[in-house]
Image (tube, grey):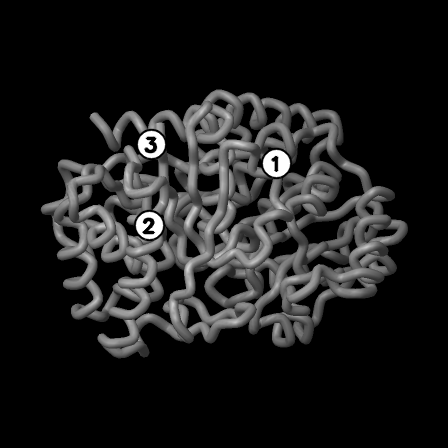
Amino acid sequence: MRLVLWHGYLLEGTGSNIYTQHVARAWGRLGHDVVVVCQEPRPERFELGPNVRVTRPDVGPLLPVFVLDRYEGIEARHVADMTAGELELFVDRNARAVAEAHDGRADLVLANHVLMGGPVAARACAGGTAHAVKIHGSELEYAIRGRPQLAALAVASLAGASALFAGSGHIVEVTEELLGKGLHDRMHVVPPGVDTDAFHPGGGDLAGLIAMLHRDAAAPHPGRPAERAPDVDACERLAGLGRFVLYFGKLMRQKGVHLLLDAWSRIAPAVPDVALVVVGFGDARGELEAMPAERVIFTGAMDHDHLHRLVPLADAVVVPSVLPEAFGMVAAEAASCGVVPIVANHSGLAEVAAGLGRNGVTFDGTAEDLAARLADVLALPEARRRAMGLEARAAVLEQWSWEGIARRLIDLSLA
């Protein structure tokens, strides 16, 4: 089949970026001819396979976003702060690129994000091409909530979509809350997948990671903003690392890293042989580094090649988000590595924990309870902790492989 995957952003760094990369790769492995329309300036860095090509349309000077980040060669602006004319330019240029993919003969277009994927796909597919939209939590919580004009734009754009995909039951509930229940008949829960070949228990390699970080510091990726790269001295900070607890993700208050640091400060004196490693970038980094806590190592951002080597070495991975998450991807990736995830007991995080059964540990959203759960996991004998992790990996393999997810997206869109 000829498939087009539209995404407004990059192919690494955030959940929807990683989602796009893996769906495209899985479709290609299944033998489909795939075109990805996105803003990734260097797609050659990603091994997407021979059946996948990437095109980057010129969308004008502004990029509508939900969380402000820096992008190469374009100004990111919150979607709510853009004028109707600016959004129209963005939609028109993207829609043209989507319509031209596969010379206008695509069998299916899948667009990421209700905004601006819904308007882009609706216009590009006005001639009758089947299209579907993947709804993510970011546009719902950071753009549409509290902004009726954006909600109205989203609802109107979805009228012709054959299917709408949510990563969890929580996202279905939020979508119906913000956009109404009229979309229910076309809504399907299809969680993201996990790259179980890359995230696996035998992948831990501290020496290999440190060597990679040395190379990155000596020859940074051209054009990549400094905050999206590992710190130049991350290799020195991680040298000699023993037991550790890991957080990886955005450094923003909504992700709950401040809760983790609070919890860590409560238990760190009782576990003097354990460190806390914090991986990621974001505006809250300075505030977080200033919090009083011992044996905390900030590394800056890491990409998946780094994380494949780091995550399997952790005693536990903590996902302490304060705001709802569409899906607990970090928790699922940790479990795929055979590492026990400790997650906030809400939204898609709770759904992932439920999928892991007794091997998904939850806390009630407070620093006190997180400290208690973390202390419990660290007190387990290593053999027991590793056995829990391997059982969790078995659950990931059964429920969240990318090829199975990719097939479901096609089948439900064209049913």
Q: How crowded is mark 3: few (under 14 residues within 10 Å), some or many (20 or more)?
A: many
Q: What element carries label 1?
A: strand
- The residue that disc 3 covers is 409
Q: Residues within 10 Å of mark 2 (few under 14, many from 20)?
A: many
Amino acid bearing label 3: Leu
- The residue that disc 2 covers is 98
> If you read the primary sequence from the N terminus, does the residue marked by circle 3 or circle 1 appear first?
1
Q: Are marks 3 and 1 in contact (CB under 8 Å)?
A: no
Q: Quadrant of the N terminus?
A: top left
Does residue 170 appear in this view? no
Tell us which disc is closer to us: 2 or 1.
2
Amino acid bearing label 1: Val
> How far is disc 2 from disc 3 in space, using C-alphas?
18 Å
- Residue placed most toward the observer, 353 or 373: 353
Does residue 262 appear in this view? yes
Quarter of the view holding residue 203: top right
- Give x and y (percent) for residue 320: 52, 54
Amino acid bearing label 2: Val
Task: Tell me if 392 is positioned left or right of 81 in this view.
Answer: right
- Residue placed most toward the observer, 31 or 350: 31
Task: Tell me if 193 is positioned left or right of 46 in this view.
Answer: left
- The residue that disc 1 covers is 340
Q: Which residue is drawn at 25% across and 32% down?
A: 413
Q: Quadrant of the C terminus?
A: top left
> How far is disc 2 from disc 1 in space, using C-alphas?
41 Å
Task: Tell me if 179 is positioned left or right of 66 in this view.
Answer: left
